[in-house]
């Protein structure tokens, strides 16, 4: 199946509102010049309203870096899908490795966030990935299977077509290390086969799976040439307009 590529920039805890708007406008220009692919940026919560306003008439999609599971309630520090869609946000990242590793979010909580995103009309980007210790002890696939099985608990077949997956090996995030294109392809093929076994082949063929982990202009072309890599979840390189532009314009 010819899956539409998705290049996503996760800005994490960076940029003032003015800086975020300028970077989003640059990404929107690159997105408009590449109509055969989707481009997404995930600003900090403080910048979402202004970024959505600035790029609302462009093809650029705006995502949140996280989302709560309920529509409202006594959840200090959280933000709901309703609040996000009210701004024009269309997607939400859930299960990012930093949420897992630094903030202690477990698979059950990530599953609740994913279900909350779906119920609230957002397209979730579910992140999975193994640590260096897990890879070196040959547990990559068992870890990914657990994260997928628990993270997708209760997601119906028809909802799977709205889902985006992102494989982000924890050992490659912000370290300068990148999985080789062969390592990345092997894992993406495993994840696609998991979807075929857990759901059905047409779902596996339709779901986009992104690679995340020190993606940069120098490696984007070789990564995107792999048959099961449908895009990239970009961190540091997405904070620079020139480097992100080159990644968006992969060949």
Image (cartoon, rainbow, N blue to C red):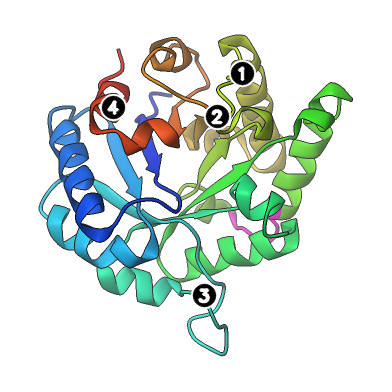
What residue sits right under mark 2 in the picture?
Answer: 213
- Provide the residue span drawn in magenta: 151-156
Q: Is residue 236 left or right of residue 116?
A: left
The residue closer to the viewer here, 126 or 195, is 126
Q: Residue at x 74, y 58 (%)?
A: 106
**Residue 58 picture location, percent across and down:** 13, 47
Q: Secondary structure at mark 3?
A: loop
Q: Secondary structure at mark 2?
A: loop
Looking at the image, tell me whether mark 4 or mark 2 is earlier in sequence order: 2
Residue situated furthest right in the rendering: 137
What residue sits right under mark 1 in the picture?
Answer: 179
Please determine whether, in this image, residue 198 is positioned above or below residue 184.
Answer: below
SS majority, magenta: loop
Looking at the image, tell me whether mark 1 or mark 4 is earlier in sequence order: 1
Please determine whether, in this image, residue 168 is positioned above or below residue 77.
Answer: above
**Alpha-carbon span between mark 1 and mark 4:** 20 Å
**Residue 45 picture location, percent across and down:** 38, 65
In the rendered structure, does residue 152 fall within the stretch colored magenta?
yes
Looking at the image, tell me whether mark 1 or mark 2 is earlier in sequence order: 1
Q: Secondary structure at mark 1?
A: loop
Q: Residue at x 66, y 35 (%)?
A: 170
The residue closer to the viewer here, 164 or 196, is 164
Image quarter in which the N terminus is found: top left
**Alpha-carbon span between mark 1 and mark 3:** 33 Å
What residue sits right under mark 3 in the picture?
Answer: 78
What residue sits right under mark 4 in the picture?
Answer: 248
């Amino acid at each position: 199946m010819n899956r539409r590529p998705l290049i996503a920039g996760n800005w994490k805890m960076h940029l003032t509102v003015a800086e975020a708007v300028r970077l989003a406008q640059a990404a929107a220009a690159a997105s408009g010049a590449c109509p055969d692919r989707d481009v997404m940026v995930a600003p900090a919560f403080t910048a979402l309203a202004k970024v959505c306003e600035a790029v609302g008439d462009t093809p650029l999609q705006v995502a949140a870096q996280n989302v709560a599971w309920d529509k409202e309630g006594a959840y200090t520090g959280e933000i709901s899908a309703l609040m996000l869609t009210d701004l024009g946000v269309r997607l939400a990242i859930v299960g990012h490795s930093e949420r897992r590793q630094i903030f202690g979010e477990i698979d059950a909580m990530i599953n609740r966030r994913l279900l909350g995103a779906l119920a609230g009309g957002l397209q979730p980007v579910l992140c999975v990935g193994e640590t260096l210790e897990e890879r070196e002890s040959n547990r990559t696939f068992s870890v990914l299977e657990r994260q997928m099985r628990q993270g997708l608990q209760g997601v119906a077949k028809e909802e799977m077509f709205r889902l985006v997956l992102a494989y982000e090996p924890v050992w490659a995030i912000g370290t300068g290390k990148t999985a080789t294109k062969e390592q990345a392809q092997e894992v993406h093929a495993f994840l696609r086969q998991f979807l075929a076994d857990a759901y059905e082949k047409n779902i596996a063929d339709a779901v986009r799976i992104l690679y995340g982990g020190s993606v940069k202009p120098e490696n984007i072309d070789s990564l995107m040439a792999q048959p099961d890599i449908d895009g990239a979840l970009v961190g540091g390189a997405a904070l620079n307009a020139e480097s992100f532009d080159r990644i968006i314009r992969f060949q």
